[in-house]
Image: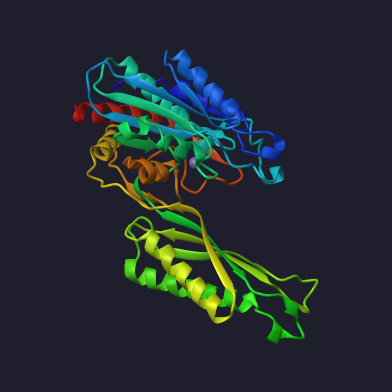
Amino acid sequence: MMDVDTAGAVAFAAELVRIRSVHEPAAGTAEAPVAKLVELRMRDFGWDPVVEEVAPGRPNVIAVLDGGGGPGTTLMLEGHTDVVTEGDRSSWSFDPYAADVVDGRLRGRGSADMKSGLAAMLYAAKAVVDAGAFPGRLVVAALVDEEGLMLGAKAFAASALAAEIDGVICGEPEAGEICAVSKGAIRLKAAFTGAMAHGAMPQHARNPLPVASAYLQAAQRVQEDLQREHGEHEHLGQVYLTPTVLSGGDVDQINVIPGEALVCLDVRTVPGVDHEALVQRLTDLAETFGADAGVTAEVTVVDDRPPVDTPTSHPMITALADAHQQVTGESAVFGGVPGATDGTILTAHAAIPSVVYGPGGKWIAHQADETVEVAEIETCARVYAVAALRYLHSEA
Ligand SMILES: [Zn+2]
């Protein structure tokens, strides 16, 4: 087997965790210091990464490694450099940025999501390069803003290089499961505008609140229809349309009928749900309810991320499954990603087949006391390396 410097990967993951790469404009923090560390490590490896600012202080770092073994496919290993905030520090039982190893676990914000995955990918790619010439290319990318609006992935998807990529492995924490499917997501705002009036004279009002209420109930019915139509996905469960914002009126002015109300929906879909048709249906409903009450409805899609459904027969995925088996001695377990990842964007915007596989528990991300098992980082680094070589050679 290839010689992967797993100790190096673990140490590098710890270095990354020590930097608080939360995108917090008020505090002036973002991904740049972590991106710099990634860039410098790539240069230490003898690579020549490209650093592209997607927004001020928010650079993508991308290395293209030509195998020198002739033409072939291009495989991308992708991770993100941002982390979510640690939140209330008193809910942590250790310093979220100490990045110490205790009882075989690397601890800290971003240890699982996903600085260990990113470190494992860098060291896996290094092992592949060190093992000699290979056909095709490896692309190692550390992108910004996965936890936000995925600006890094969107910028990359729009680049010329994206069109040349045949498959991408995203190193998000999935507990060693190979996740070829991810749920889709739509963030939708329905703004209802009527006419304000005195509470004593509702006949002069066009009250948006009952419209908002009817809309919420309609969304519930749409959810039931879609759940009936699509059933329970093996790895992704049900379709959900969850109301997350309902606002309108003023508690200090109960005698005032408000002119405006807002409903926001967090929609989570499975493969097979037509996002365009669904948004159209939700728009029509808002407009119909509004029209009946003389209220204008404006539906805005804030973000639209289609589901990912990469066939498990894709050679990148069979290579990953074979590599997992070879490295761990156990057969691969397939799963699904409940949220969206950078892979969602890369698949939706650039038609790159994506799969998610990385160290760390599925549910630990974004929680207090985030940790990752060191052994999992080591395993993933080896699996990435073996999978990359198998895939690049299989397609040659
Ligand atoms: Zn993540």
* Residue 7, horizontal then vertical, whole percent: 46, 22
Badge count: 0
**Picture quadrant where residue 174 is located:** top left
Identify which residue, 67 or 201, lies in the foreground.
201
Say which residue appears at 29% left-offset and 36% top-offset: 320
* Residue 36, horizontal then vertical, whole percent: 55, 22
Say which residue appears at 77% left-offset and 86% top-offset: 200
Q: In which quarter of the image is the C terminus?
A: top left
For this view, does 216 lie left or right of residue 335? right
For this view, does 55 lie left or right of residue 387? right
Q: Quadrant of the N terminus?
A: top left
Compared to 259, does 57 lie above or below? above
For this view, does 96 lie left or right of residue 313? right
Q: Is residue 3 visible?
A: no
**What colour scheme does the image use?**
rainbow
Compared to 262, does 6 lie above or below? above
Say which residue appears at 28% left-offset and 33% top-offset: 323
* Residue 336, horizontal then vertical, whole percent: 37, 51
Say which residue appears at 42% left-offset and 33% top-offset: 78
Find the residue positioned furthest to the right. 252
Identify which residue, 91 or 146, lies in the foreground.
146
Compared to 361, does 205 lie above or below? below
Compared to 377, does 364 lie above or below? below
* Residue 284, horizontal then vertical, whole percent: 46, 71
Identify which residue, 193 or 118, lies in the foreground.
193
Identify which residue, 373 or 84, lies in the foreground.
84
**Picture quadrant where residue 147 is located:** top right
